Amino acid sequence: MSFSRLLFASFIAFCLARFAFGATLLPDDEVEALRDIAKTIGKTNWNFSADPCGGQWGWADPNPEKGSENGVTCNCTFSNGTICHVISVVLKSQNLEGSLPPDLGRFPYLLEIDLTRNYLNGTIPPEWGATQLVNITVEFNQLSGVLPPELGNLARIEKMQLSSNNFTGLLPATFSKLTTLKDFRISDNQFAGQIPNLIQNWTKLEKLGIQGSGLSGPIPSGIALLGEMTDLRISDLGNGPESPFPQLSSMKNLKTLILRSCDIIGPIPDYVGELTKLKTLDLSFNKLIGEIPSSFSGIRETDYIDLTYNNFRNESSCIQRKIVCSYSMVFDKLLLATEFYSFHINCGGNEATIGGNKYEDDTDPAGPSRFYHSRTNWAVSTTGYFMDDDRPSDTYTWMNSWTNSAKLSANTSALYMDARLAPISLTYYGFCMGNGSYTVFLHFAEIMFTNDKTFNSLGRRFFDIYIQGKLVQKDFSIQNEAGGVGKAIIKNFTAFVTGNTLEIRFYWAGKGTTGMPVRGVYGPLISAISVTPGKLRKFYELNHQILFVKYKTMNEASLV
C-alpha cells in the first residue's frame, strides 16, 4: 500500500473509531513530545487543553489552502479505538523560526514530517534515522550542514525532499540502503562531489531532482536501472568530465526529462523519440551533435521540447535569422550603413523617459520559445517555461506589487515598477551596432519577494550574466548586492562589438528557490538596460567627416 493510501486509510479509521467508541486518548508521552516539538520549531498556536487528535483548536485546518497545510493526524484504531498515536505532522508555510526536533522517535507510529516553506535552521538530527518515517520533506528552509549517515537506516522511507536549503558535503554512502525510495529531491543546495552511483540501488525511484545542487557529473551509468522513473530532472552539474548521453531506454513511463547543462556530448539516441509518454523534454545547453533523430516524430504530443544551445546540424533557432540593417543614400552614390550607438529598454514595462533618455517599451508577452524584434535595433529572446507553476499561467513580465517600491528614488522608480522574467534563458540583442567599445548598464530590483520575517522573505534568486558570450558574473543575486528586496542596483560592464551585434544573456543555472512565495518563481529578472558608447562616438563622427570630404572631392573632380 502506498504512503498516501495508508494515511487516507488511517484517517478514515480514526473517524470511524471516534464515532463508535467516543473519546480517545493520546498517550501522555506523545502529548509531552508535541509540547517539546512546539518549543523547538516555534509553533505557538497548538492548544494543549484540547485533544491534539481532535482536528481543531490549532491542531488541524479543516479547509487548508494548497501549500499551507497545517495539521497533526492521528491513528485512533489502537486498543479498540480508545488509544491514538500521531502518524503525521504537516506544517507548511507557517513561518516557523526554530530548528528541527531531534526526538521524533517519541512517536513510535510517526510516518510523515513535512515542514515545507518555513524559517527553520540548523541541521537534520541523526536521531531521525532511527524512526519509521516514510516521508521527510523540509524544502525551502534555511537548513545546513552535512546529511547524517544515520538517515541510511530509514528502512521504509519513500519520499525525501530536501531542496532549497544550504546542505553541504557528500551524499552519505549509507544512502545505498534506501531501496524503498520513490521521490528524492536535493536541488538548490551546496553539496560536493559527483552524483554517486549508489542511486542505482533505488530501483523503485519515480522522481529524481538534482538541479543546481552543487554535485558534479557525469551522470552515473547505474541510472539505467531506474526503470520506474516518471520525472527525471538533472541540470547544471559542476565541473565534471564530458560524457555521452546516459542510457535511459528502460524508463518507458517518463513524462518529464530534463538533462540541461550536463556536459553531454555526442548524438541524441534514437530511443528518446520512443519515450511516447514524454510531456517535457529539455536537453539544452549541452554539446550534442549530429542530427535530431527522425524518431522524434513519435513524441509530437509533447508539450515542451528545448534542444537549444547545442551543435546540431539541423538545429533551428529563433535567433537564426538575418537582421538587415537599413541603409541611406548619400549624394545619390555613396551607401552608408545606418549604425546604432546606444539603446535603452524598460524591460517588461512601458516607455519611460528617465534622465533625458527614452527607455523603449518591452511589453511583448514572450513565451517558452519566443523571439521579439523591436521597432528599432534591439530584440529579446526567452526560452523555457516555469515548471510546476502555482500561478494560473506563465508570466514573463512582472509588475511591482510590494509597498517597498516606494523606497526607490522618485526620478528612477519608473524603471523598477516592472521587470522582464524568464525561466531559463533571457537574451537581449543590439543589432546594427557600430563596432567598438560600449558601457552596458543593467538595472535590477527584486520585486517578487518580501522583506519581512515570513517564509516569503526566504526567496533566493540566482542567475548568471553573460556579455558577448563571456561569463561576467556567476550566481548573481539582486537582493544580496542591492542590500535587500525593493532596492535598485545598477551593474555596469564594458562590452566590445566587432560584428555589429551586442548580446546580453541571463541564464538560470538551477540555483535559488523555485517555490517562494509560490512555485514557479525563479530565473533571471531584469528591470532595465541602457547601452551607451565608450570612445566610439568621436571615431564615428570623424569617420563620417572623412567620408564626406572624400566624396565631395571626388564629386567636384568629376565636374571639372
Image: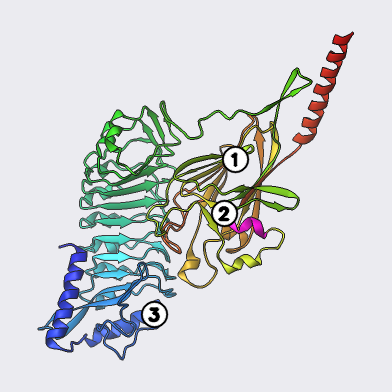
- Main SS of the magenta segment? helix
> In the picture, which quadrant includes the N terminus?
bottom left
Q: Earlier in the sequence, mark 1 or mark 3?
A: 3
The answer to whether 296 appears left or right of 95 in the picture is left
Q: Secondary structure at mark 3?
A: loop
Question: In the image as oriented, which residue stretches furthest toward the left?
Answer: 80
Can residue 103 be seen here? The reply is no
Q: Position of residue 305 (x, y in %)?
A: 37, 40
Instruction: Examine the image and state in which quarter residue 430 appears.
Output: top right
Q: Amino acid type of disc 3?
A: Lys
Picture residue at 41% right of the left edge, 39% below the top? 284
Q: Residue 20 lies in magenta, yes or no?
A: no
Q: Which SS class for mark 1? A: loop
The crowding category of the residue bearing disc 1, from other C-alpha atoms within 10 Å (few below 14, some 14 to 19, many at least 20), is few
Type of colouring:
rainbow
User: Hey, what amino acid is under mark 1?
Assistant: Ser
Give the quadrant of residue 241: top left
Question: Where does the magenta region start and end?
Answer: 413-418
Q: Position of residue 252 (x, y in %)?
A: 22, 43
Q: Is residue 415 magenta?
A: yes
Badge 2 crowding class, 10 Å Cα cut-off, few under 14, some 14 to 19, many 20 or more, is: many
Residue pointed to by mark 1: 374
Residue found 21% across the figure and 69% down from its top = 132
- Mark 1 against mark 3, which lies toward the viewer? 1
Depicted 209 relative to depicted 63: above or below: above
The residue that disc 2 covers is 419
Q: Which residue is mark 3?
A: 43
Residues under numbered marks 3 and 2 in contact, where contact means CB atoms less than 8 Å apart? no
165 horizontally vs 62: left or right: right
In this view, which residue lies farthest toward the right?
560
Q: Amino acid at mark 2?
A: Ala
